[in-house]
Amino acid sequence: MLPKFTINMAFSNLAVIIQRGRRRMKRRSTVIKRRRRQRDICKSHEPVPEIPFDLVIEILTRLPAKSLMRFKSVSKLWSLLICSRTFTNLFQKVSSSPPRLYMWLDVDNRNVLLSTSSSPDDSDVSSFVIDQELTIPPNKGYYLSHVFGGLMCFVNESRAKIYNTTTRQLVVLPDIEESNMIAEDHKYKKIMYHIGHDPVHDQYKVVCIVSRPSDEYGEHSYLSEHWILLLGGDRSNRWRKIPSRCQPHVPVTQVLNISGRMHYLAWVGFLYSVLVSFDINSEEISILELPKENDFFPKMTDLIEYGRRVALLHHIDLKRQGVLNLWVVEDSKKNMWSSKTLVLHPSQMHLVNSIGLKVQGTTRNGEVVLVPQNYTYTHTGKVTCNPQDTSLFYVLLYNLQNNHMRKVEIKDTSNRYLTRDWDVIGLDDIHNLIYL
């Protein structure tokens, strides 16, 4: 008779063998079922149901812009679809991008351009985070003029380039060869480029304003030219000169774009400034007189959007008295303005004491973005921008409706950018898929 432990071992080995056999039979059965299923599908000759193309478009519009850039390589059809103007417009309507700030830094004698983002779920924008160092093809000698509609404008004297922050496409604009003023070697000549959008024909255009003081003795007057170029057209596109009967002028502020019109302050005479509006569709220029009740110094006055209207924010007394004056265009044809004086709460005065500020746009929530500046004014009136007082990056957001100001940090989670030479140079919330 076999020992008891020998019998137990035999049963144990047998159980293992049976279990292995069951596993093999199960795998074989699964393979047979799969083959039968594939054979039945082939016999039925029924095509696999396709996703409707409208549904494909709907799905694509919900995807991040970076994913769409990768999906362009799926097929020629997808590439044409994603680059089309119809899909681009649909994507911008459906997608909701959080505001982004663009920063310039000087790190170890190296110019760095950074992109910062806020949380998509953060409607009140509690902070920005540096998320990308923009690698742009060589731009030696060029500086970032402005950002509009997902497009960056880089300028180097009379030359300009347009860069799409989403598609990474860089376009060098042609020279304005027919301009006599650009060809002149004048000490006080000024050339300003700006991107605008024509909502009627859904076209992006670049406007170039060339200006300088008149050389006539004793005359405090100016000469100016306006040129326009259509973006996204064929290579035969050329700059066109815009005829205008408006008084020649010199722009003194950055441009504000609202509803297909460009607005900026300009000198038309000695210490005499006006509001200039340029309609991107009709390409007509108009001039609006500023309110007579106040003496506006353009260096301390910025254009902002206030309830879809153009407004002047006069902040010369902000850091000393906490006072801002707001002037809003109510009726441009009748030259009617409304005014409002805002006084900062004493508990918030520490935010603006002893620092200069510049306006860098308005968020969709109506908060004005104020960027700290360390300016020095010489006796000749020349302005020098010095390093910031701190290496901590931040901006101030000012709600004009409830007269509340708050400090919003720009976080550098990598701790790579330790410098006092920094500035915020753009605010945008558009991912533009347009092919230039």
Image: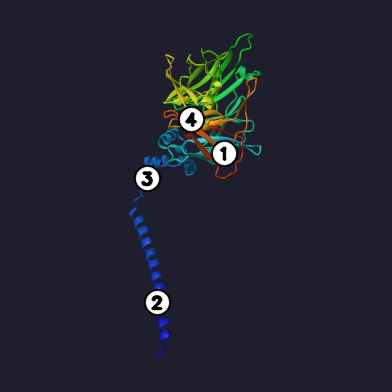
Task: Tell me which label, 1 or 4, sits earlier in the chain.
Answer: 4
**Which dot, 1 or 2, sits closer to the camera?**
1
Residue 429 or 36: which is nearer the viewer?
429
Residue type marked 1: Leu
* Three-letter amino acid code at the position of disc 3: Ile
Q: CA distance from mark 1 to mark 4?
A: 24 Å
Quarter of the image for the N terminus: give it: bottom left
Residue depicted at x 55% and y 42%: 412
Q: Residue 3, located in which quarter of the rendered image?
A: bottom left
Which of the 4 quarters of the picture holds residue 298?
A: top right
Task: For marks 1 and 3, give the CA distance.
Answer: 50 Å
Q: Mark 2 sits on what residue?
A: 15
Residue depicted at 63% across the width and 22% down the height: 382
Task: Give x and y (percent) for residue 309.
Answer: 43, 23
Tell me the residue that label 4 is attached to. 346
Q: Which residue is mark 1?
A: 392
Residue count near mark 1 (Cα–Cα under 10 Å), binned few <14, some 14–19, many ≥20: some
How far apart marks 1 and 2 lie (CA) works out to: 70 Å
Element carrying mark 2: helix
Judged from the image, the secondary structure of the residue bearing numbered disc 1 is: loop
* Type of amino acid under label 2: Ala
- Using the image, tell me which numbered label, if any, was put on residue 51: 3
Where residue 182 appears, as percent x and y from the top left, is: 62, 20
- Viewer-nearest residue: 61 or 378: 378
Q: Report crowding for label 4: few under 14, some 14 to 19, many 20 or more residues within 10 A (C-alpha).
A: few
